[in-house]
Image (tube, rainbow, N blue to C red):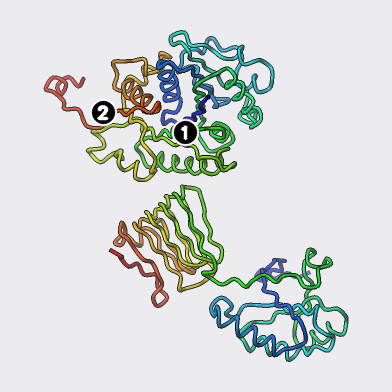
Amino acid sequence: MSKVVVVTSGKGGVGKTTSSAAIGTGLALSGFKTVIIDFDIGLRNLDLIMGCERRVVYDFVNVIKGESNLNQSLIKDKRVDNLYVLPASQTRDKDALTKEGVQTVLNNLRDMEFDFIICDSPAGIETGAIMALYFADEAIITTNPEVSSVRDSDRILGMLSSKSQRAEQGLEPVREHLLLTRYDPSRVNRGDMLSVEDVEEILAIPLLGVIPESQAVLKASNSGEPVILDDESDAGKAYRDAVDRLLGKEVDFRFLTEEKKGLFSRLFGA
Amino acid sequence: MQTSPDIEFKGTGFTLTVIKLGSNSLDALQNILMDKIAKAPHFFNCAPVVVDVSQADDELDFVQLKEVVEGQDFVPVGVTACRNQQQKDSARSAGLAVMTAGALQSESRPANPPTPAPQSANSATKVVHGHVRSGQQVYADSGDLVIVGSVSNGAEVIADGDIHIYGALRGRAIAGAKGIKQAKIFCQDLQAELVSIAGTYLLNEQMVESLARASLVHIEQDKLVIRSLA
C-alpha cells in the first residue's frame, strides 16, 4: 500500500525541496520504493537538488496531459536503488494541475507498487500547494524557527484539516509531522531564534526532526547530492533520524544543544 | 438634476423579523409578544418587525395592531402580504409601510408554513475539538462557542453568546457579535491579538499587563475588563 506524503510549509525558502530530496532518498536507502514528485510547476527545482536536471525529457504536466507515460517521465536515481523523481514542468504554470490529473498519476504510481510517494509542495496556499496536499496520507510541515514561518505552517495545518481529501471525505485525518529546519542552538540560547519547545507549543503537532543549520546543505544543493548522502554532516545525520522516525522507530533527538567549542575551533572558527 | 454630496440613495437589504398573524385576535398577538420578550429581553429589544397579514381578515384594525406591537417595545416597520387594496389603504393610513416580500416568498406557500423557532442567545452551543489554525474562522450563530484546543495567531473565533477556550487564545475572539453586552470570553492563556464583546474591543498592545494568564473578559460599566482566573 503506497503512502502519499506531502512536504509543505506555506512559506517559501524554508527547505521543502531539500527536505523532500533528503527524506525521499533516505526512504529509498531504507529499502522502500520511493518517488519524489515536484509540484512546483514553473519553478522546477527538485531535479537540481537531486542532480538529475540534465536527464529531464518529459515532466509531471506531460503525464497529466497524456503527452507521455509515467515510465518515460520518471527519472531513476543513479546513486540509490528504488528512487525515482518526477520533475515539474518549467514552461507551464500551476493551472496545468487538476485534481483528476493528479489523482490518475498517483493511482498509476500506486499500481507500480511505490511504497512512498513524496509530494514536494510549492510555497504559498494557491492551487499548486492545494494539489500537493490534497491526496496526502501524511504531511511533513517544514518550518524554520522564526515567527512568520511558524504562522504560515499553522495556516497550512488548517488547510490540511479542511481542504484535503481526507478532510472532505471525513476519513481519518492526515497524519502531521513537524520538521524544524535551519535550527541554530546558539542563536536560540541568545534569544534570536524560537526554540523547539516554542514551535511545538504553537503548532501542537508531533516532532519528526530537527535539522541543524549547516554549511553542508548549501553545498549539497549546489552539487545535486541530497544532503542525507553526506554521512559526515550534522544535517545528513539529522535527516536520517527523521526518516527513521517517519518509519516508526524511536530515535533520540540530536543537535538540539550548542556544541562546546574547544580552544582550537574558537581560534580558527571551524 | 441636483444632487447633494451628503445624501445618498442606495438600495440595501435588511434582515427583519416577520410576525405572521394567524387571525385577527390582537390579544393573542400581545400575549405572544410578551412571552417572547420575557424569554429573551435583550434579543428583541426594539427589534424592527414586519407583520404578515395574509391569514388575517380584511377588517383588521391596523391602528390597534401598530399600538400592540409598539406596546411591547418592537418597532413596526410595515405590513406584508396584503390581499387587497382595502387592506393596503388602511395600513397606509395607520402609518405602516406596505411591503412586498422577496421573490422566493411571493410564490405559492402552504397554508401553514412552519414558523422558525425564535432564536435567542444560548440556544445552541457549538463545540470545536482541536485547534483553530491561522486563517480559519469559526462562528457560533446565536449561541456559545467552546474550543477544546488553542486559537492560533491569525485565526478568528466569533460567537453571538460566550466564548470558552480550553487552550491558548492567540488569535481574535469576538463574543456577543450581535450586541449582547453580557457575553464573556474565557480562556486558559490569554495572548490574543484582539478581544471584543458587543463591539467594544481591546488590542493586544492594550492588554500587555493581562497577557499569558487564564482570563475572563467581560464588560463592566461599558468598559472591557480582563480578570485573571488564576
Instruction: Please state if A16 lies on the left or on the right of B47 as rendered.
Output: left
Marked residue nearer the N-terminal end (1 or 2): 1
Q: Secondary structure at mark 1?
A: strand
The location of residue B32, given as percent across then percent down, is 65, 83
The location of residue B79, given as percent across then percent down, is 76, 79
State the mark number for residue B227. Answer: none
Q: Residue furthest top?
A: A78
Question: For the point 66% across and 15% down, which residue is it?
Answer: A68
Of tags 1 and 2, the one toward the viewer is: 1
The residue wearing badge 2 is A255
Q: Is residue B102 above or below residue A72?
A: below
Question: For the point 32% across and 68% down, which residue is it?
Answer: B227
Q: What chain letter is assigned to the residue under label 1?
A: A
Quadrant housing residue B189: bottom left
Instruction: Please state if A251 lies on the left or on the right of B108 as rendered.
Output: left
Q: Secondary structure at mark 2?
A: loop
- The quadrant of the image that shows the C terminus of chain A is top left
The location of residue A134, given as percent across then percent down, is 56, 35
Q: Residue furthest front?
A: A1
The residue wearing badge 1 is A139
